[in-house]
Image (cartoon, helix red, strand yellow):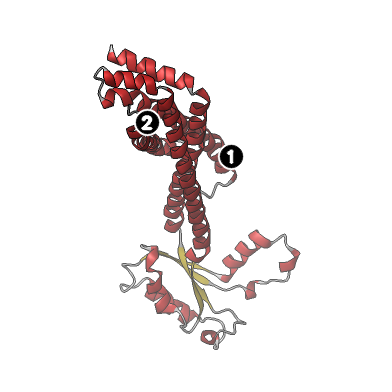
Amino acid sequence: MRLQFILAEIGHGLRRNLSMTVSVVLVTFVSLTFVGAAGLLQLQIDEMKDDWYDRVEVSIYLCPTDSDVPSCAGGEATEEQIAAIRAELEGEALAPYVERVYFETKEEAFAGFQERYGDDPTFASVTVDQMQASFRVALVDPEQYAVVSEMFEGRAGVEDVRDDRELLEPLILLLNRSSLLAAGLAAVMLLAAVLLITTTIRLSAMSRRRETGIMRLVGASNLFIQLPFMLEGAIAATIGAALSVTGLWFAVTYLVEDWLASSLRFVNFIDADAVWLVAPVLVAVAIGLAAISSVVTLSRYTKV
């Protein structure tokens, strides 16, 4: 009997404040979409970092014929210098840090250059002799770049030691800042959602103040009086969360998996399963919003 009464009160309250209920659903939907987008973006950043950092290499560029770097004062790197560098890279001292070593000759470097820029007339005069040989070193832990750098930087026959992470970190930084921006927008929208849910519950409670007064006079408990209002807010917020999860699923499925993943094949993108990882969080946040709004409002507006 009590359950039937509570359900009837919930339906009555939702219908009476239909426009406000729809507003709560929409604001919650937009707010949680930003929250979910920030979470998915962070998952994508972590996926990219794990994938790209595993492929990061340290490049040891050997002296070409025309370098003005002090370590290249003797001209192009000699076979003895190349052999000494290879021996150290493959030696026991660097064994805990180096996973594999690949030597790229000038001819191989030129072939790669031609493949990338062969159609550009600006580089038509570039020859094999202008290329430089290099060692490509894959590290066990990319964070240990300094170990290799300190050993070979400024050494005779070595023009430059470069960490491929220098190319990736600006992109990762941009993505991290985008994630923070989305989180900031989400926080603002969540505050708006709390205020709107609070207003909706307050209006519903004020419109039924006479009813709640009668219920209190006949001995109804605070929980029994307040529960319909709490559930109204929770239901509206949960519907908003469900719409948010649905929208994120469609976005990841059709925008990321079907379009971006096929266009940018060198990037490992998240899939729709990632949405189900953030979905419980979004539902929990929605219920939390409703709970906070209820606590703020009901203690005052359900008193006789």
Count of numbered labels shown in the rendering: 2
- Within 10 Å of disc 2 (Cα), the crowding (few <14, some 14-19, many 20+) is some
Q: Which residue is mark 1?
A: 259
Q: Residue furthest top?
A: 1
For badge 1, the amino acid type reads Trp
Q: CA distance from mark 2 to mark 1?
A: 51 Å
Q: Which residue is mark 2?
A: 301
Q: Quadrant of the N terminus?
A: top left
**Image check: 77 left or right of 122?**
left
Asked if disc 2 and disc 1 are in contact, CB closer than 8 Å, the reply is no
Question: Which is more N-terminal, label 1 or label 2?
Answer: 1
For badge 2, the amino acid type reads Tyr
Q: Which mark is residue 175?
A: none
Position in image of residue 122 (x %, y %): 74, 67
Residue nearer the viewer, 245 or 22: 22
Classify 215 as above or below 190: above
